[in-house]
Image (cartoon, rainbow, N blue to C red):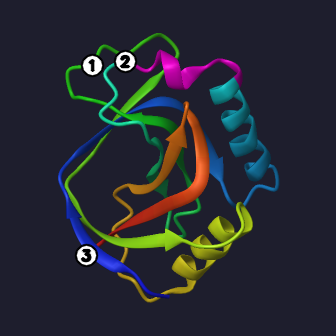
Amino acid sequence: MEYATVVKGPMYVMGVSTKVSTEVEDSKKQVDQLWSQFFAEDIYNKIPSKANNNIVVIYFGYEGETKTTFQYLLGCEVSTSTPIPAGMTFKEIPASTYAQFSVKGKFPEALKDTWESISKSVLKRLYSGDIEIYATENGRPTYKDVIILVSIE
């Protein structure tokens, strides 16, 4: 699978989050519920001081040897000095080198296929914070331009 190597400074993300384990059968349901909450509660428009119009997903706090349990934060990139509204999570992802993947194909199958290829790859992952970036129109993802950034050595 082709990727570009990019270096990014720290990233600050605010939104709603949940703990997910890919070893648990209902993990997809948890993620789907978080996306439903994000839209039903209009979280996008409640996030102050957005750095851009993208929707961002951060995978962080990986646990155990298999790294199959982690925090899943759905939100937007913000400035560092932003107050955190009640019920939201703020996370700083440290500066890192990333393998950048462009998701191509029908959504959500293409996203799942890209992540499966990443998990089977020989990348030397850091698990310090992996990122999905969704371009938006009117606060909704277009699913046309989805980027995955995987922290690597």
Residue at the far top in the pictured view: 86
What range is drawn magenta here? 40-47
Residue named by callout 2: 48
Q: Is residue 17 visible?
A: no
Residue named by callout 1: 82
| Nearer-N-terminus badge (3/2) | 2
> Which residue appears at 61% of the width and 19% of the height?
42
| Nearer-N-terminus badge (1/3) | 1
Q: Is residue 12 magenta?
A: no
- Find residue 137 and report its horizontal and vertical position in percent: 54, 38
**SS at mark 3?**
loop
> Which residue appears at 79% of the width and 45% of the height?
29
Circle 2: is it few (<14), some (14-19), or many (20+) Cα within 10 Å? Answer: some
40 up-or-down from 64: above or below:
above
Q: Amino acid at mark 3?
A: Glu
| Badge 1 vs badge 2, beta-carbon distance below 8 Å | yes
Viewer-closest of 54 and 15 = 54
| Badge 3 vs badge 2, beta-carbon distance below 8 Å | no
Prevailing SS of the magenta stretch: helix
Residue named by callout 3: 153
Q: Amino acid at mark 2?
A: Pro
Q: Is residue 45 magenta?
A: yes
| Nearer-N-terminus badge (1/2) | 2
